[in-house]
Image (spheres, rainbow, N blue to C red):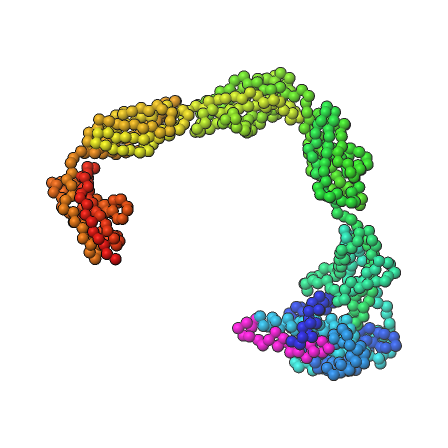
Amino acid sequence: MNQRIMDYKKISILIVVLIGMSWLNTADAQQANEAEIHLFARYVEGNGIEMRWLSDNNEVMRIGTESGFVLERRVAGTGSFQTIETVQPLNESQTDELIQTTVGEGNRADRLRVVTELRDSDTEHLPGDIDFQNRIEDLLNRKSAEDFRTMTFMLSSFEDSLAARVLGLSATDTNVMQGQTYEYRASLANPGGLNAVSVVTEITATEQTEEYEVPILVNEGDGELSFIWEQPENSVGMYVQRSFSENGPFEPLNEVIELNLRGNQYEGPQRGTFFDKELNNYRNYHYRFYGQNVFGERVLFGEASGTPRDLTPPREPLLLQPKHVSEDTVRITWEMPGAVDNDIAGFAVLRGDGSSEEFVRLHPDLTDPNLREWIDLDFDRDLDTYYAIQAVDSAGNVSSSAVLPVSYIRFNPPVKPEVGQATIGDDGSVEIIISPDPGDAVDGYKIFMANDPEHEFSVVKEMFGDSLITPGSRTVVRDTVMLNTLTRNVYYKIRAYDVHFNESEESDVIALERPDIVPPPRPVFKNIETGATEVNFEIALPSVVDFQTATLYRRSGPDSDWQTVQVFREKTEIVRYTDPRLEPGVTYFYRLQSEDQSGLLSDFSNPVQVRTVNRRSVSVAENLSAQYGDRGAVLRWSYGGSDVDEVFFVIYRRSGDRGFQQVGRSESTTFTDRRVRSGRHEYQVRVYRKDGNQSAMSETVSVQVGE
């Protein structure tokens, strides 16, 4: 596409929909499968009847602006139409001649050249040749290009009468009789089979004054003005000018016509709007609004004036907690967050019962803007009292703080609560009886609980109101605590409150011992060492405060009874015990169980199986030899004992400065050390019985391993 057309497309994006032209409805025309050519006419004395014609159909506009239109006329109500002119569009050289003789170079000349070049462009190639793999998208692109060309022709004709002349969309009938009524229509000079309906326009050769003026409503905002009006039927879009004086000079606010866009199915009022922002408050601005008529003329259709006003409220005051500082005095203080606005006129202090309808100002005039405190001497202590602060600026804008109540102080607050009785049941139910308040000033209680008197107490219950608190009578508090816990005691304390939520001292701490339903943890075997006639134990005892005893049990076989071996009463983490006088080579089973001070028993520990060492002599491995081969160091020895089926052999090696270390185990009298490195190595063998007895070390043999 020609670069000049591309540039013009970019700057024309705001003017692609016409407002107020009810005939311009492409969707309806396509549904009817026929196009219409509309003609507009007016009589200008001394010139004749000026005409413009347009179509809502892309193909009509394409053919007509290429091959021309036939203009026909008849006297209204008589005879048939007669051709008075075939209007041809100007070619490129004719357009250049018109430019040179009429407008010279500039934006207007560029517009005239654009419409000429756009008329000669083939819309089938505007988006590229149709790709049948993406046919729908290409067809939509081509339709978009055709729509753009048609709308450019229309808007260019509206903005400039010379553009209508270049496109062949205008003519003037000078051969008319003043006062006579005529009918005109325009049709395609070369329709090429296209069915285009020529809509007839009737006009009387009498000059008439066009009524463009419409009322414009103004809304004065904060730093901005907005305007709304009923769009004149005989103009489209708008140009806006602004001045600081009613008589000017006026400066344009837009160079390109602005349109209020809406869908083609819209049937509501044809209204125009305009917004002007970033204005100075309290300064008068004057505006003139112009529209564009179909004959390329800019016409004034309305004037308006407005003054932006400060509508922004000040920052909200931060009301601090009102305080009852003496019997007849409430102090109200507040702050302003951040820097204080320069237009703050003062503050208003409000008092009420909590509902917004009942708040009243405590003073007739605003306070000094620098004031941050107010003393209220006229409150009623028998009512709930709330306060709020309003900040007011010089424009009358108001912001409000949060609403806060005042807590009244009694100079004889409720006395410290006295507890008459407190009990805890086996199910964890707690009952605390509070003695009557001697002054009958109590309206409620808060009950606090903790598991340790040194910990922070938490509120577990609140009791307020006549149904729970009766003057002159004791108050019963009921609660439930968990019993499945390692803390033995639970602690309570109570605080009394009067009707204004003034509080008493805390009661003495009430300690209640939970009933013990949790058995102690099991003891644990930590370490066991076995000898021939004894077993040595290390045992971890439960670390709970109510630990009483731990018992060690033993039996000598799965079918024998468990016997108590030892009872441990030490308050320590680890105890050590030796079970003596056992039989060598015998298997024993041991288990543990603990008991707490309430007689609750833990589960038994998992039984452990212990076999004492059977003392027997074991023959030494003899005739040990070592030889290095391809697979490593090969050791051989002999064993002369009769218990060869009950023994196995453990091989030890010493290399360099390191001592003998176990390198393997064998069930036979040979072993190959495959992980040996170069150097000198020494070997020994020890014989082990499966009952735990063992022999002495064999003699040492050595072998030299080469590189």
Q: Is residue 16 above or below residue 507?
A: below
x, y percent for residue 267? 71, 61
The structure residue drawn at horizontal position 72% and vertical position 36%, both measured from the top left corner, is 334
Q: Is residue 506 above or below residue 83?
A: above
Quarter of the image that includes the C terminus: bottom left
Q: Is residue 64 above or below residue 137?
A: below
Asked if the magenta segment contains residue 133, the reply would be: yes
The structure residue drawn at horizontal position 22% and vertical position 48%, both measured from the top left corner, is 682
Between 187 and 512, the one nearer to me in the picture: 512
Tell me which corner region of the image, top left, top right, bottom left or bottom right, holds residue 302: bottom right
x, y percent for residue 441? 64, 20
Asked if the magenta segment contains residue 594, the reply would be: no
Between 575 and 85, the one nearer to me in the picture: 575
Quarter of the image that includes the N terminus: bottom right
x, y percent for residue 176? 85, 79
**Which contiguous range is marked in magenta?**
113-136
Between 21 and 359, the one nearer to me in the picture: 359
